[in-house]
Amino acid sequence: MLTMKFTYEVEGNEFIDAGVASSKFKTTLKQLGLPSNLIRKIAIAMYEAEINMVIHANGGKIVAEVTPTNIFVRLEDHGPGIPDIDLAMQAGYSTASEQARTMGFGAGMGLPNIKRYSDHLKVHSEVNVGTIVEISFDIQ
């Protein structure tokens, strides 16, 4: 398998379209014949990260790369940034708006679920600049 790269734009505050990028990538991974348990982990982690972009960061860009040994997903936004990454990694902690919460989002499980389902997670954030989330998955 050659290295393949996919790019998705995510709109902020567009709850109806939230999850479209992760769904499209999941379909691509199925077409590539990757194991279903791996696809499930990738879909969950990418969805959580994508939803965070919609809720907190006015959208952003996702670049997903498939190599013979790994899947890499980089999500970059120009939102408000995360002031305390350690706090944001705690299950149940959320800064989601009331609008997001009434729609069923913002339970504070985004980053914890990304960590749980990915093999590697890096979060880089600067207040008033934006956030970069890098997740990767080993292909067994």
Image: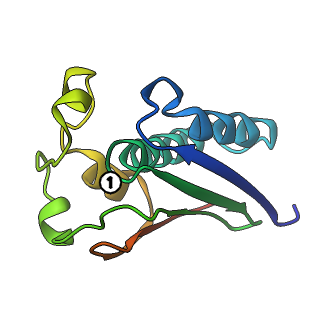
SS at circle 1 = helix
Quadrant of residue 12 within the rendered picture: top left
In front here: 13 or 1?
Answer: 13
Give x and y (percent) for residue 90: 13, 57
What residue do we see at 14% from left, 50% from top? 91
Q: Residue at x 63, y 49 (%)?
A: 9
Quadrant of image for the N terminus: bottom right
Place of residue 114 in the rendered image (x, y in percent of width and height, measured from the top left): 37, 53
Q: Quadrant where the C terminus lies?
A: bottom right
Whole-percent x, y for residue 105 in the image: 27, 31
Identified at 48% across, 33% down, the residue is: 18
Which residue is rendered at x = 59% and y = 56% of the image?
A: 62
Q: Is residue 70 left or right of residue 81?
A: right
In the image, is residue 113 above or below residue 20? below
Residue 73, horizontal then vertical, whole percent: 57, 61
> How many C-alpha atoms fall within 10 Å of the one at disc 1: few (<14), some, or many (≥20)?
some
Which residue is at the front of the view, 92 or 67? 92
Foreground of the two, 133 or 12: 12
- Left/right of residue 105 with respect to residue 88 in the rendered view: right
Residue hosting label 1: 116
Which residue sits furthest right?
2
The colour scheme used here is: rainbow
What's the amino acid at mark 1?
Arg
